[in-house]
Image (cartoon, helix red, strand yellow):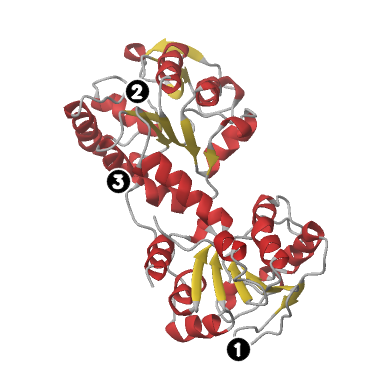
Amino acid sequence: MDVIRFADLVARGQAAGKRVFIRADLNVPQDDAGRITEDTRIRASVPCVQMALDAGAAVMVTSHLGRPTEGEFKSEDSLAPVAQRLSELLGRPVRLAAHWVDGVEVAPGEVVLLENCRLNKGEKKNAEELARKMARLCDIFVHDAFGTAHRAEASTYGIAQYAPVACAGPLLAAEIDALTKALAAPRRPLVAIVAGSKVSTKLTILQSLAAKVDGLIVGGGIANTFMLAAGLPIGKSLAEPGLVGEARAVMQAMAARGAQVPIPQDVVVAPRFAADAPATIKAAADVGPEDMILDIGPQTAAVLARQLEAAGTIVWNGPVGVFEFEAFSHGTEAVARAVARSAAFSIAGGGDTLAAIAKFGIEHDVGYISTGGGAFLEVLEGKTLPAFEILARRAQG
């Protein structure tokens, strides 16, 4: 995908003295007192801001935080804690500017954080008047928030339409490169892991991948529905019997291409969904009516591990079991460690997937960890993200 990259503009000296508007993703969790409890997104945004400052630009940064009501400011919606943390990370003052849409003063070498962009009326509906006002604030618009790339809002899409220059920041550019490598031009075999509680939430993803991948590993409640489609008992496990036909169609589409959806040979069951529930390994065909499947069994884990270790490219979204409960975490751990051992290029995304990666300490063994949940899923679904589309269009002149 051809987009203008901010790093290239900086390398050519085209950002010096320019007004640079960065749309970052600084939507971090906070406790009841407004203290930031996890600052990964802020730290991930620092390189783009520092790049602009080092280039001698006048830097404006904005982000959404939470889900405020447009036009109604409340203290809990303020980016003030973010400004403080960003200041600490950059080692320089970061001024917070409110009511900035009609103009903001910022000098070259200075960085200003523009208050929560979702407070602006017309933001979510991508109002043209708002987008044009934002665009007038800058010479260069930098989209560096992949987590918002699937939304066509004023600060993510509209401003990119009207700004003199619209480009991808280093985070967004890295996402484009990783997704292109994994899906547009993958090294084969391409294996996808798609797990979660419901087929219905990921049916279009499964259907899209069934036409592309060489192996499709399903896990969690999704695997239970596929087990039903394969004629296996699942007891009282979470499943969607109404989507058995769709699951069977995905299996048939894969089989027609000489590919497969491996169905669990063994599973770990419990009488109830609880961390202290007794775990029992059973053959998939032996699941009883009162059993609840909470993980894949060791035989299945070994089969999947071999498939992952032989892959050329791995796309991973979702843990294959209830990994938060120790007794039912072994399947996800086996998958995680196989991904880590594999020579394949791997890309992982989604909150639960990232939590599993962190739990098993394999962050440095995954080729690329995507920062966007919904955006990552929409790419897997085969959709073109609004941010990618407008940046590619602007790159064509």
Q: Which callout, 2 or 3, points at the residue further toward the start of the chain?
A: 3
Q: CA distance from mark 1 to mark 2?
A: 60 Å
SS assignment at label 2: loop
Disc 2 target residue = 234
Most distant residue in the left direction: 256
Q: Is residue 65 visible?
A: no
Contact between labelled residues 3 and 1, with CB atoms less than 8 Å apart: no
Which quadrant does the N terminus fall into?
Answer: bottom left
Q: Amino acid at mark 2?
A: Ile
Q: Nearer the viewer, residue 63 or 277?
A: 63
SS assignment at label 1: loop
- Left or right of residue 254: residue 237: right
* Above or below 224: residue 41: below
Name which residue lies at 40% across and 46% down.
180
Name which residue lies at 30% across and 24% down.
227
Which quadrant does the C terminus fall into?
Answer: bottom left
Q: CA distance from mark 1 to mark 3?
A: 42 Å
* Above or below 202: residue 94: below
| 1 vs 2, front mark | 1
Name which residue lies at 60% across and 89% down.
102
Most distant residue in the bottom direction: 102
Residue 59 x, y percent position in the rendering = 68, 72
- Left or right of residue 83: residue 117: left
Disc 3 target residue = 204
Q: Which callout, 1 or 2, points at the residue further toward the start of the chain?
A: 1
Name which residue lies at 63% across and 34% down.
358
